Amino acid sequence: MHTVFKFLAAFGAIAALTGCVSPEQFETAPVQLRTSKGIVTCQLYTKERVLWDRSIDRPASMTVQEADDICKREGYRQKKEG
């Protein structure tokens, strides 16, 4: 019985991994945005995945949260434009 449980656990793990969604599948070309603190480089995703949008480079004077917020706003702006 213990062997059957191990097999089912392993099978479940493999099945879960094969169904994973990888963000790389939805990436668009990085976008550079000029801000008052400097250039923010954003990794945007498809318009259906705006919540994933994030900064991949930012000025030293800017927090990660600030840069990510700028990127998310850009993602929503592009989504709104259609």
Image (spheres, rainbow, N blue to C red):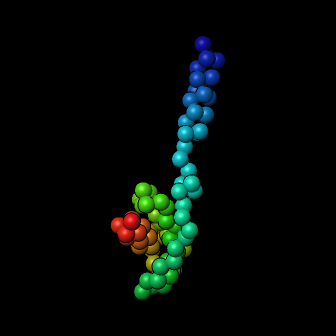
31 and 64: which is toward the camera: 31
* Residue 74 placement: quadrant: bottom left
Query: Horizontal and vertical percent for residue 3?
Result: 64, 17
| Residue 73 vertical position relative to residue 13 in the rendered view, above or below | below
Outermost residue toward the front?
82
| Residue 76 vertical position relative to residue 25 in the rendered view, above or below | below
**In the image: residue 24, left or right of residue 63:** right
Q: Can residue 56 be seen by looking at this rendering?
A: no
32 and 58: which is toward the camera: 32
Which quarter of the rendering shows the N terminus? top right
At 52% from the left and 67% from the top, the residue drawn is: 43
At 55% from the left and 39% from the top, the residue drawn is: 19
Which quarter of the rendering shows the C terminus? bottom left
41 and 79: which is toward the camera: 79
* Residue 78 placement: quadrant: bottom left
Query: Horizontal and vertical percent for residue 23?
Result: 54, 54
Q: Can residue 64 be seen by looking at this rendering?
A: yes
Query: Horizontal and vertical percent for residue 52?
Result: 46, 59
Query: Horizontal and vertical percent for residue 13?
Result: 58, 33
At 49% from the left and 61% from the top, the residue drawn is: 45
